[in-house]
Amino acid sequence: MLCSTVIGVLLGCLAPAAALSRSVPTSFVLVGDSTTANGTILNSGGWGNGFCGSTNITALTPSSLVKDTPCINTAKNGATTGSFVADGSWDIAVAAIQAEVARGRRTLVTLQFGHNDMKIAPPESMGANLTIMIDQIRSLGAEPVLVTSLTRRNFFDNGTIQDALAPWADETILISQQQQTHLLDLHAHSITYVEAIGPDAAHRLNRSPDDNTHLNENGTIVFGRMVADLFRASFPGELPIISNPGLSFNISHGIPSY
Ligand SMILES: *[C@@H]1O[C@H](CO)[C@@H](O)[C@H](O)[C@H]1NC(C)=O
Ligand SMILES: *[C@@H]1O[C@H](CO)[C@@H](O)[C@H](O)[C@H]1NC(C)=O
Ligand SMILES: *[C@@H]1O[C@H](CO)[C@@H](O)[C@H](O)[C@H]1NC(C)=O
Ligand SMILES: *[C@@H]1O[C@H](CO)[C@@H](O)[C@H](O)[C@H]1NC(C)=O
Ligand SMILES: *[C@@H]1O[C@H](CO)[C@@H](O)[C@H](O)[C@H]1NC(C)=O
Ligand SMILES: *[C@@H]1O[C@H](CO)[C@@H](O)[C@H](O)[C@H]1NC(C)=O
């Protein structure tokens, strides 16, 4: 960018906008169910580790975040929006949010529910609970970011996804519009990707062969990067997210990486 003039200085283009805004220290707090949660055992494993980076990941995994960016994954296996509050997980998330805000950091809080809410109540129940969480996040001085559910990897014979989560994804989108939050449509993007790579490649990302819900290490790397790329698209130039051009290319072009 050419910024050698006085006008350039006035426009603040001495440094690229992205570099300027990256100087805003940012933290992430993740709230959700097992498809976000840390998980190294059977019946667990979400995108959070791939997004945050984790010392437990043994595969080649560049974190999605600039080194030392706080990324606190409070997501809980089996959680609904209701159980997350009732079992004290929300209090843990709130404490993490308060701590990051108190350090003067811009604090982004992802909310992704649906996989278990769908087993107990209509979408509106989750939506009402999300609205309460959004209000509380804002009252703490942090920013809510709604995330639609990671798809399950159950396919029809014709190669399309059996999508039982759609009404809960739609409810999440509706609440994000009503409450004017950022939205990461992981549900739509993950369906597009797994339909493109097909069942065999999609199932290689399973925690165990028959577990079409949870992710192994390769799966958390892929979907953690997908979330990182959705963050970048929603907050252009603002976040401490590092690039992984090869993996991003594969994801956006429907190519299996593993
Ligand atoms: C999940 O892992 C992250 C580091 O990757 C850590 O900060 C966080 O406390 C862990 N959360 C749980 C619930 O174990
Ligand atoms: C790493 O894995 C160990 C053993 O599986 C577990 O106790 C620990 O909580 C994990 N740490 C993180 C940050 O996920
Ligand atoms: C929403 O929260 C209420 C408690 O406030 C609970 O009764 C309800 O089951 C929750 N809904 C879901 C889908 O978890
Ligand atoms: C694929 O099969 C399912 C189940 O039979 C059907 O509902 C869906 O419309 C089909 N999709 C396409 C694109 O053929
Ligand atoms: C992208 O996909 C190709 C083909 O499957 C694979 O060889 C390569 O390792 C992938 N790149 C990344 C960064 O995952
Ligand atoms: C992850 O991908 C690598 C490279 O393709 C492969 O060697 C490894 O077995 C995969 N891990 C799992 C758990 O499938």
Image (cartoon, grey):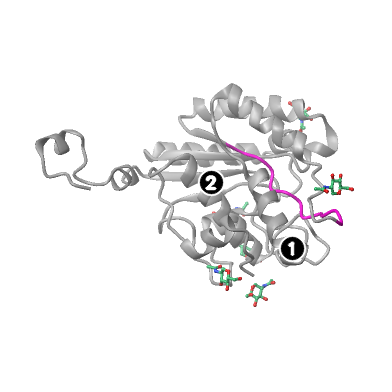
Q: Position of residue 18 (x, y in %)?
A: 33, 46
In space, the residues marked 2 and 1 are separated at their CA atoms by 22 Å
Is 3 or 123 nearer to us in this picture?
Answer: 3
Residue 174 vertical placement versus 40 (above, below): above
Q: Amino acid at mark 1?
A: Asn
User: What kind of secondary structure does the magenta stretch mostly adopt?
Assistant: loop
Q: Nearer the viewer, mark 2 or mark 1?
A: 2
Q: Quadrant of the C terminus?
A: bottom right
In the image, residue 208 lies at what x, y percent?
A: 78, 66
Q: Quadrant of residue 222?
A: bottom right
Looking at the rendered structure, the secondary structure element under dot 1 is loop
Front one among 27 and 60: 60
Q: Residue at x 80, y 60 (%)?
A: 211
Q: Is residue 8 left or right of residue 149?
A: left
Q: Which residue is mark 2?
A: 230
Q: Which residues are magenta?
A: 146-157
The single residue placed furthest to the top in the displayed view is 178
CA neighbours of label 1 inside 10 A, class few (<14), some (14 to 19), many (20+): many
Q: Name the quadrant containing residue 181.
A: top right
Image coordinates of residue 159 in percent, x first then y, are 80, 56
Q: Quadrant of ligand 5?
A: bottom right
Residue type at mark 2?
Answer: Leu
What is the x, y in percent for residue 196? 69, 57
Q: Which residue is mark 1?
A: 206
Q: Is residue 151 magenta?
A: yes
Q: In the rendered view, does 16 fall on the left or right side of 35?
A: left
